Structures are given as C-alpha cells and as structure tokens.
Image: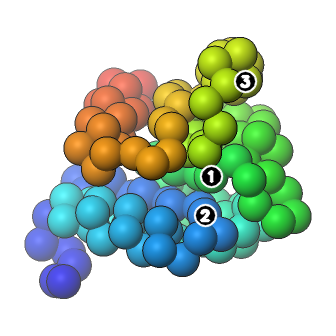
Amino acid sequence: MVSGLGGPDMAEILVVDDDDVIRETLCELLAADHSCQTAETAEEALAKLEAQRFDVVLTDISMPGLNGTELLQRVVENYPGTPVIIISGHSDQDHAQRLIDRGAFDFLLKPFRLEVVEESVRRAIDQNQGQD
C-alpha cells in the first residue's frame, strides 16, 4: 500500500474497534481512497482526536473501557461536525435510532458488506465537506 497518492484532499478516517480483524479490514478497505488510522479503544481514539482532525470516525459499540456510545457523546461535544458512524452486532432499531438522535451519522450492522461501509463513509465525507 502506497500512501499519499490521493493528494492533500484525502479524507482522514479513524477506525475504532477492539477486534483486530475488523479494524484492519476496514482500514485496508478505506486506505485505497483515504488516509486511515486505527484505535483499539475509545480512549486511544480520543487521544488521536486531540492530536489530529479526522473527517470521519467509525466506531464499534461494544469495547472494553469507554464504549462506542460514550465515544460518540465525546466526539459530538468536543469535535462538532465530525461524523461518527456506529458499527454494532446488535440489530436493535430503537437503540440505533437513539444513537442517530444523539448525533451518530449512520448505524451499520455487523456483519456488514464492505460496499455499505464505503458508501456510508462517502456520504459522511460529502456532508462534512459541505460544512467547510
């Protein structure tokens, strides 16, 4: 993988998941068109968000320590305008709607199709760039 070929307008994506396989799969998928970083925990993600601006955050819900819901809340409070895409293994429509109401950009269900993730990220980037 060669980074930097996409030019300065490449989106910065942060993938947060305690599952190594999911984290690396998503980052590999997104790195073809974007600059991608990973975090294993919400705490690690918050440290990265303090140090750098990200265009999109993809996060799992169930993680040790702070969970994805708490990460969403912190991103909404501290980094307004940064879209957060939630990934969950639980298909609870009420829970998904509550997360959207709290500021999540999208809610994706595991197992997800990679093209669905790509489309959600593309929409989040388009919305984010429209606010600049």
Q: Quadrant of residue 6?
A: bottom left
Query: Does any portion of residue 33 appear in the rendered image?
Result: yes
**Separation (CA) of disc 3 from disc 1:** 14 Å
**Separation (CA) of disc 2 from disc 1:** 5 Å
As shown in the figure, which amino acid type bears the numbered disc 1?
Asp
The disc at residue 17 is 2
In percent of width and height, residue 5 lies at 12, 72
Residue to which mark 1 is pinned:
60
**SS for dot 2:** loop
Q: Residue at x 29, y 50 (%)?
A: 114
Residue to which mark 3 is pinned:
95
Q: Residue at x 45, y 48 (%)?
A: 111
Asked whether disc 3 touches disc 1, contact meaning CB atoms under 8 Å apart, the reply is: no
Asked whether disc 2 touches disc 1, contact meaning CB atoms under 8 Å apart, the reply is: yes
As shown in the figure, which amino acid type bears the numbered disc 2?
Asp
In percent of width and height, residue 27 lies at 38, 67
